[in-house]
Amino acid sequence: MNATTYTARAHTNIALIKYWGKKNEELILPMNSSLSLTLDRFYTETSVTFDERLKEDLFLLDNSKKNSIKVSKFLDIVRQKAAISIKAKVVSQNHVPSTAGLASSASAYAALALAASKAAGLDLNKKELSRLARRGSGSACRSIYGGLVEWQEGNDDQTSFAYPIKIPTDFEVTMVALVISTDYKKISSRAGMKRVVETSPYYSAWIQNTAEDLNNIKQAILERDFETFGEISEENAMKMHALNMSAHPHFSYFEPDTIKAMQIVEKLRSQGISCYYTLDAGPNLKVICLKKDVQVITDFLSDSFGQEKVFVAGPGPAAHLI
C-alpha cells in the first residue's frame, strides 16, 4: 500500500453523566451509560502514516518520542481490521494538558482512530469509528461526535458506542474550565475506577442512580431546563467522587483549590447566577453556565486563581480530517 499520511483533529469531552467503572477491561465496556459535552477549546491533532520501511511503530507526542506500547496495541486493532501488518508513524500534538482531568485521552484516541483507520485504507462510519476509539480510551468514543453525546453502555463490542444528542437551538450551554493543576495524577482513571468497582460498598447504588440521572438530564435538555440540567450534572459528579472516598484504600482527586473553586461557584449561585460545577478524574473544575453569565464567572475565578488558569469553551465539533 502507498504510504499516505492522514491527519485528524478531535476535541475533548467532559462527561456530565459520568462513566466510572468497566465491566470488561479489554474491550473497555462501561458499567453504565454516560453523557458528555464535546468542547471547542481543547483538542488533539494526530497524523498517521503506515510505512513499509518501518521496523516498529514510532510515536511522537508534542515533538518528543514516547513509549509506543499502548499506541501499538491500538494500531494492532486497526491493522487487524484492514488486514495489513505494516508499522506506522504516529505524530500527535496535544492542545490540552495531559492527565489532569481534562479528558486528553478522549481527544487523543478519537483523533488516532480517525487518522489511523483512514491511513490503513478503511472507510468507517461514525458508529464504527466510535467503537474503534473506545478500544483506546472509553471516553474517546464520545469525542467522535460534537456537542452533547450519549455513550450507550452496551454489552459487547458491537453494542457499546456513542451517538449525538440534539441540542435545542436556544440552549446555550457554555463551560468555563479552571486548570488548578497540570501535574500527573497520582491515581490514573483506569486504576481509580477499578479500585472503586472492586471495593466501594456504594457501587451498586451508583449504577442505579446514574441510570436515573441520565434519563432525567435528557428530559431537562428536551425541556430546555438549564437549572435541572446543571443540578443533575453537579450532583452526578459529586456522587462519582464520593465513590472514590468510599473505596479501599480511599482516594480523592480534589486539591484545596478545588474546594475553594466549588465554594465560589456555590456563592455565585446563591446570588442568582445559574452555574454548576463538574469534575472528572482530576482536580480541575469545569463550570457549566449560560453564555450571558460567562464574564462574571471568569472574573471571579480569575481574581482567585489567575486569568491564565481560566478557559472558556463552547460545544465543540465532531472529529474530522484536516
Image: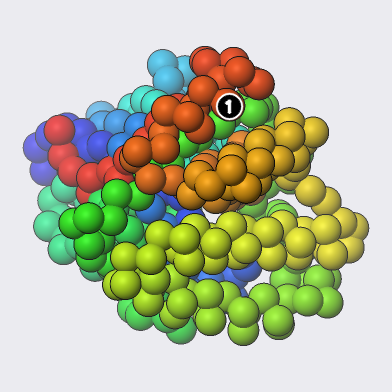
- The chosen color scheme is rainbow
Residue 100, horizontal then vertical, whole percent: 60, 35
- In the figure, is residue 93 to the left or right of 168? right
Percent of width and height locating residue 19: 55, 65
Task: Tell me if residue 159 comes above or below residue 279 in the rendering.
Answer: below
Residue found at x 38% / y 45% = 290
Amino acid found under the numbered disc labelled 1? Leu
Q: Give the quarter of the image for residue 208.
A: bottom right
- Which residue corresponds to the image point at 64% horizontal and 55% vertical from the top-left? 190
* Quarter of the picture holding the N terminus: top left
Q: Residue at 83% of width from left, 58% of height from top?
A: 245
User: If the image is split into quadrants, where does the C terminus sit?
Assistant: top left
Residue 228 in sight: yes
Total count of labels? 1
In the image, residue 236 sits, relative to residue 175, either above or below, namely: below
Identify whether 265 is placed above or below 126: above
State the residue lying farthest toward the front. 271
x, y (%) of residue 96?
45, 30
What residue is shown with label 1? 301
The reply, left or right, for residue 151 in relation to residue 163 is right
Q: Crowding near pointer 1: few (<14 within 10 Å), some, many (20+)? A: many
Residue closer to the observer: 55 or 35? 35
- Residue 186: image location, x then y, percent: 76, 39
Secondary structure of residue under mark 1: helix
* The quadrant where residue 131 appears: bottom left
Using the image as rendered, state which of residue 208 and residue 135 is in the foreground: 208
Q: Nearer the viewer, residue 84 or 17?
A: 17
State whether residue 19 appears in this view.
no
Residue at the location (79% across, 48% down)?
252
